[in-house]
Amino acid sequence: MTTLPIIDLSAKQDPATVENLRHALRKYGAFRLWAPELKQAVAGGLLREARGFFQLPTEVKQRTKGYSGFGTELIRGTTPIPKEGINFFRKNDQRDGCIPPPAEFFRHVIAIHDNWKRSQDQLFNLVFCDVLESDIPLTGTPSLDYESVGIQYYNPQRMITGDGDYSPPHMDGGTLTILIREDDEGDGLEVADLESTEELGSDGVGREADFLRVPTAPDEVVVMVGTRLQRIMGRTKARACVHRVVGPGQKHSTDDRVSVGIFRACVPHPPPPA
Ligand SMILES: O=C(O)CCC(=O)C(=O)O
Ligand SMILES: [Fe+2]
């Protein structure tokens, strides 16, 4: 398997597809999803609004609910990621004196969230019932149905050198992440082949594993397993995807990069008191 399998939720999955998906969940913790509506909803306005937001003066962004400044998000608690971001619908995200995001931007985010709601049950049924053959109820409990939307903004002009990467290898914290990217050949997303190394942590996997490029394609998004799903299902069934974003490199030295993630059942940030 040298590309991620693709799933079309509107079709009935044949046994070979289900078997491929089962393998992909162990090898990469990721697969592609045919999602033209979601892709078009993002292209038709959200990206423009997001770019507009990230051009606002820093002091305005910093007061906006859900915003995290350049280099403030850390991987494994230590490595700053050279990006800015804004998160929506995250619990415990209360800072004093926050202002809401621009109304038109927020309207587009809500539209994406609503659009995704139409497919999410189908996706969860396929993954949990057909592929993982799980009888653990993974939907219908408030802590697992929790979902946030995060928008990442990568600006090559803010990179100190042109040879650093946009995002170091890491795993996401939730059950599944739906990642929506712009169509761009050299977009930089790569996922680790988890069968190519004995390492288990994202740091070791990042150093030792073979990585597979995941090119963007029209009408497709990527689905990635997070650490929470791995914990629930066990590593023999589903591994958390270790992914990174390489670049920007020469080609993208002037183009910025925007991605949208729908993070399902991600740990609220900051975590609630124990
Ligand atoms: O921007 C991307 O393609 C990946 C983003 C990501 O991995 C994340 O936000 O957790
Ligand atoms: Fe991620």
Image: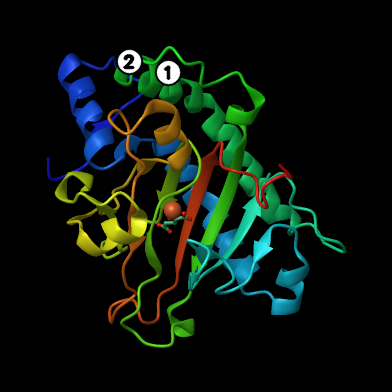
The residue depicted at 40 percent of the width and 81 percent of the height is 254
* Drawn side of residue 178 relative to residue 103, left or right: left
The residue depicted at 39 percent of the width and 20 percent of the height is 128
* Drawn side of residue 191 relative to residue 15, left or right: right
User: Number of callouts in the render?
Assistant: 2
- Residue 214, placed above or below residue 141: below
Q: Which residue is mark 2?
A: 130
Q: Residue furthest right?
A: 97
| Ligand 1 shown in quarter | bottom left
Q: Measure the C-alpha gap from mark 1 to mark 2.
A: 7 Å
Could you tell me residue 194's position as x and y percent?
Answer: 23, 46
- Residue 248, placed above or below residue 99: below
Could you tell me residue 5's position as x and y percent?
Answer: 22, 35
Q: Which residue is mark 1?
A: 125
Q: Secondary structure at mark 2?
A: helix
Could you tell me residue 244's position as x and y percent?
Answer: 34, 60
- Residue 161, placed above or below residue 214: below
